[in-house]
Image (cartoon, helix red, strand yellow):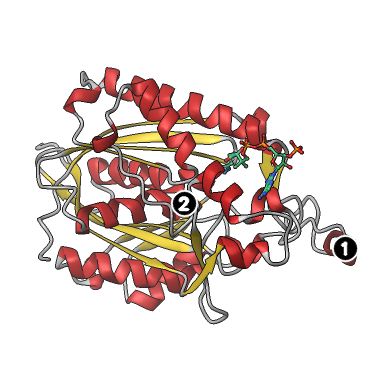
Amino acid sequence: MTRRFACIAGMGSALGSKVVSNEELARDLDTSDEWIRSRTGIVARRFAAPEETASSLAADAGSRALDAAGIDPGVIDMTVVATVSGDQPLPSTASFVQERLGMQGWAFDLGAACAGFVYGLEVASAHIAAGSAENVLVVGTEVLSRFLDFTDRSTCVLFGDGAGAAVVVAGQEPGVIGSALETDGRLAELLQIPAGGSRAPASEDTVRRSEHFIKMADGSEVFRRAVEAMAGTASSLLEKSGMTPDDVSLLVPHQANARIIRSVAQRLSFPEERVFVDLAYVGNNSAASVPAAMDRAWRAGRLQPGDLVLTVAFGAGMAWGANLIRWTAPEVAS
Ligand code: UT7
């Protein structure tokens, strides 16, 4: 039997429609544009408008990815939606996305926070290789603005809303060359939304204690672990694949913090011009961060057919991972 490989045929992205600048947040919060810019690289972020949800942003990104790939939604037989801010606890956000786009087959959500898309791409790749899927839509989508405590300056300035999607199809040459994925559940309490699940169902008390919002126990510890984990996992994936940073055309890291990205790139000895950083006007979009950045890089002409692309992400769980990809989507018409 001929081997089958997962190949990216097209990408798309979408952002929440409301632009929120650092100055706007600083109006009601003890922070400043200078502090946020210098510590994170973020100047503004996009929040979803009231009618926008994780599934509507995912469908917008998915529809752009399908158009770019020239693929009819009806041939998609598997939909993976990576999110931690889905429309509802039940059913999956993937069900809504499947219905919105008129796709078929099976659809499910995947929860790996900021590493969600990187995990999702590996899941799609494994199913394509096994012959249990043919055409997969992998989406990362988040509306984390609905889970932010706007009195907590250490978290609410970091995140934004958006979605990024990849159409992944079966091909004869790799595509997705390999992935490295890791989780350390001992670190789960570093970054969490404590209530709203079966451990602490929604109640007047959980609402009064603001437990439905994102809590980050120790920002600088998350920072330190992010750098260590992303550099480590990217480096071991390259080694396992017999490649070095010199072989990689573009590193597309999780767009959480420009200082984290700089430290990861330095540890991996990646020159600045081969690292994609464009978080200034989007903020940290969690699971949407990597695919939306890939889409923007592609549409900006930074990814050409044949290029070797390295993604790397880190987030709550703590969960992290990397994908090594031979770029197979065609050049985009400008
Ligand atoms: O996808 C993973 C999600 N999480 C992340 O990406 C977060 C990773 N961590 C970070 O990006 C950084 O740790 C932060 C941007 C959150 C903070 O930067 P830092 O250089 O690590 O600052 P710090 O945690 O050492 O905090 C320094 C000070 C503290 O004040 P005190 O205790 O020294 O008086 C904070 O209260 O900065 C204060 N601070 C702020 N000040 C103004 C925290 N947030 C703000 C703020 N404005 N928004």
**Badge 1 residue CB within 8 Å of ligand 1:** no
- Looking at this view, name the residue that lies furthest to the bottom: 51
The structure residue drawn at horizontal position 68% and vertical position 67%, both measured from the top left corner, is 27
The structure residue drawn at horizontal position 27% and vertical position 69%, both measured from the top left corner, is 64
For the residue labelled by badge 1, is the local secondary structure a helix, a strand or a loop?
helix
Query: Is residue 75 shown above or below 156?
Result: below
Q: Which residue is mark 2?
A: 287
- Residues 92 and 20: in front is 20
* Image x and y of residue 66, in percent: 23, 67
* Image x and y of residue 323, in percent: 32, 36
Q: Label 2 is placed on what type of residue?
A: Ala
* Quadrant for the N terminus in the image: top left
Residue 104 in view (yes/no): no
Q: Quadrant of residue 238?
A: top left
Label 2 to label 1: alpha-carbon separation: 28 Å
* Image x and y of residue 208, in percent: 88, 63
Residue 205 in view (yes/no): yes
Q: Which residue is mark 1?
A: 208
